[in-house]
Structures are given as structure tokens and as C-alpha cells.
Image (spheres, helix red, strand yellow):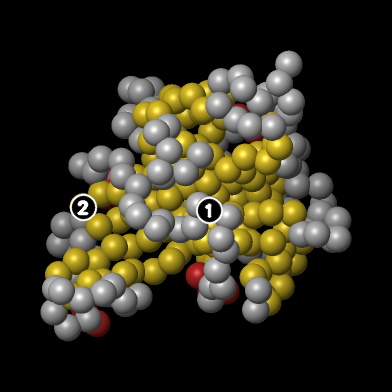
């Protein structure tokens, strides 16, 4: 089964007035290789301390996989109680993921619930939480390509990153560079901000890295939520220091 593309309506207007922001106990979604299953991947969801949580499989809106020449690969998807598994039909060098964690609304003096404001009596705020992810499984020109995610982190060099050496990336919103976005190992780290060309640097560690980026913006005139929150994880392997 080929899963639906992860394209959404343009985010530029919704994000134009927003500054970057992480938020406490934030969650992301990402892919990791499935143990004992060649070429298979597991979709994980959780916080930034390697703690994963169960999730309704319908929150995973799409996964896409591409070969070296950019061809979209067919994907077999299996929904399980401990997370979704995917199996691309071919050698995937880039995988994309879109996860919609829904809307969390908070009544005054109360705790947030996973419902739109219109369904929560007395709600004073609501956050729509979107998650995007990219895994680079093979380095080359495909690693530096923008794949059309509404919010995307794109490496600027095609070679395998090396531990301890700066790695430059560009952050795009609707395909356009955006300044002032924080990138870091997680939302609690100091990290760095993208410049006017959407570029920032990251120091990877040897082994598998999860580079985090986030942007949060106010939303006007929507009865269901007042804030749009987007988190992104770029997953990739880095080699040893030279």
C-alpha cells in the first residue's frame, strides 16, 4: 500500500507572525530501524529523553519512502499496539513522516484535553500539534533535496556528517527559507537559530542523531485552536570524527 503524501495547505501565513518556541514536555515522532527485520522501520512517538509512548495509529497521517533516483517506493504498513511498522518495497534512502497529534485545549484553571476548543466548555486556549520527520538512510544528492514537507530541515552537504564537525542545514516553510528557528539536540538544549537564509549549524555525535527544530505561532479567528505548534526531527547517521 502506498501511503498518502504528507503535504498540507501552506503554513506560511499561519507562521509568519510566530517566533520559534519549544514547550515543556514536548513530543515528537520519528522512525527507527526495526530490530531483526531488514529494511523495515518502526514509528516511535515520545519525549526527548528516549521515552516512548503508545499512540493511536490514525495519528500517523503518512509515511513516504524514496530511492536514490527520487522514485517513490510502495510501502507496506502494519498497525500494532506497540507502534506502526513500515516496510518500503525497495532500498529507501529518504523517508518522510507526518504525524498529527491533534488539538489540546485548556479550560481556565483546568488541564489540557485532546479536543478542539469548540468541544471543551470554558476553553481559553488550544494548541494544534503537528509533527514532521525525515530519516536520511543514504547520503548523496538526495540528502540535500527539499522534498516538499510544509516544514522541513534540509542538510546542505551531501557527504556523511562527521562527529564533532559542524553540519549546516536550512529550514524551509512552504519551501522558503525562514529565519529565527531553533535547531538543537532537543528543546532544552541551547542550540542555534537560523539566519536570514534559513541556515544554522549543528554538531552531530557519532552514531544515530535526532536533530530537533520547532516553531510555534498564534492563530487568529479559528474556533478550535489559538496556537499552531510544529516540531521536526531530522534523523541521520554520523560517522566518527576525522
Q: Secondary structure at mark 2?
A: strand
- Find disc 2 in the rendering and name its residue: 218
Is residue 173 something one can see in this rendering? yes
Residue drawn at point x = 77 percent, y = 59 percent: 34
Image position of 139 (left or right of 129): right
C-alpha distance separating marks 1 and 2: 27 Å
Instruction: Reply above or below: 127 against 133.
Output: below
Instruction: Reply above or below: 222 against 81.
Output: above
Q: Nearer the viewer, residue 108 or 37?
A: 108
Instruction: Please give the label number shown on residue 233.
Output: none
Q: Position of residue 160 (x, y in %)?
A: 71, 27
Indicate the quadrant where residue 221 lies.
Answer: bottom left
Q: Nearer the viewer, residue 125 or 94?
A: 125
Residue drawn at point x = 63 percent, y = 61 percent: 43
Quadrant holding the N terminus: bottom right
Ranked by sequence position, the earlier of labels 1 and 2 is: 1
Q: Position of residue 76 (x, y in %)?
A: 74, 66
Q: Position of residue 199 (x, y in %)?
A: 43, 24
Instruction: Please give the label number shown on residue 49.
Output: 1
Q: Secondary structure at mark 1?
A: loop
Quadrant holding the C terminus: top right
Closest to the camera, between mark 1 and mark 2, is: 1
Residue drawn at point x = 43 percent, y = 38 percent: 189
Q: Position of residue 148 (x, y in %)?
A: 51, 43
Amino acid at each position: 500500500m502506498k501511503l498518502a503524501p504528507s503535504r498540507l495547505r501552506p503554513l506560511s501565513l499561519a507562521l509568519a507572525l510566530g517566533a520559534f518556541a519549544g514547550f515543556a514536555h514536548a513530543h515528537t515522532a520519528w522512525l527507527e530501524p526495526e530490530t531483526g527485520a531488514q529494511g523495515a522501520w518502526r514509528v516511535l512517538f515520545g519525549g526527548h529523553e528516549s521515552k516512548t509512548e503508545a499512540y493511536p495509529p490514525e495519528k500517523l497521517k503518512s509515511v513516504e519512502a524514496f530511492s536514490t533516483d527520487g522514485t517513490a517506493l510502495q510501502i507496506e504498513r502494519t498497525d500494532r499496539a506497540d507502534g506502526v511498522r513500515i516496510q518500503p518495497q525497495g532500498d529507501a534512502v529518504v523517508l518522510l513522516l507526518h504525524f498529527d497529534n491533534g488539538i489540546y485545549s485548556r479550560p481556565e484553571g483546568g488541564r489540557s484535553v485532546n479536543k478542539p476548543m469548540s468541544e471543551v466548555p470554558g476553553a481559553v486556549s488550544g494548541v494544534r500539534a503537528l509533527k514532521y520527520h525525515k530519516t536520511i538512510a543514504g547520503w548523496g544528492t538526495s540528502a540535500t533535496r527539499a522534498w516538499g514537507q510544509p516544514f522541513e530541515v534540509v542538510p546542505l552537504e551531501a557527504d556523511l556528517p562527521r562527529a564533532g564537525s559542524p553540519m549546516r542545514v536550512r529550514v524551509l516553510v512552504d519551501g522558503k527559507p525562514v529565519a529565527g528557528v531553533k535547531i538543537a539536540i532537543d528543546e532544552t538544549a541551547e542550540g542555534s537559530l537560523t539566519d536570514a537564509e534559513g541556515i544554522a549549524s549543528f554538531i552531530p555525535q557519532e552514531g544515530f542523531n535526532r536533530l530537533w527544530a520547532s516553531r510555534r505561532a498564534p492563530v487568529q479567528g479559528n474556533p478550535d485552536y489559538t496556537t499552531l505548534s510544529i516540531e521536526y526531527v531530522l534523523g541521520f547517521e554520523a560517522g566518527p570524527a576525522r
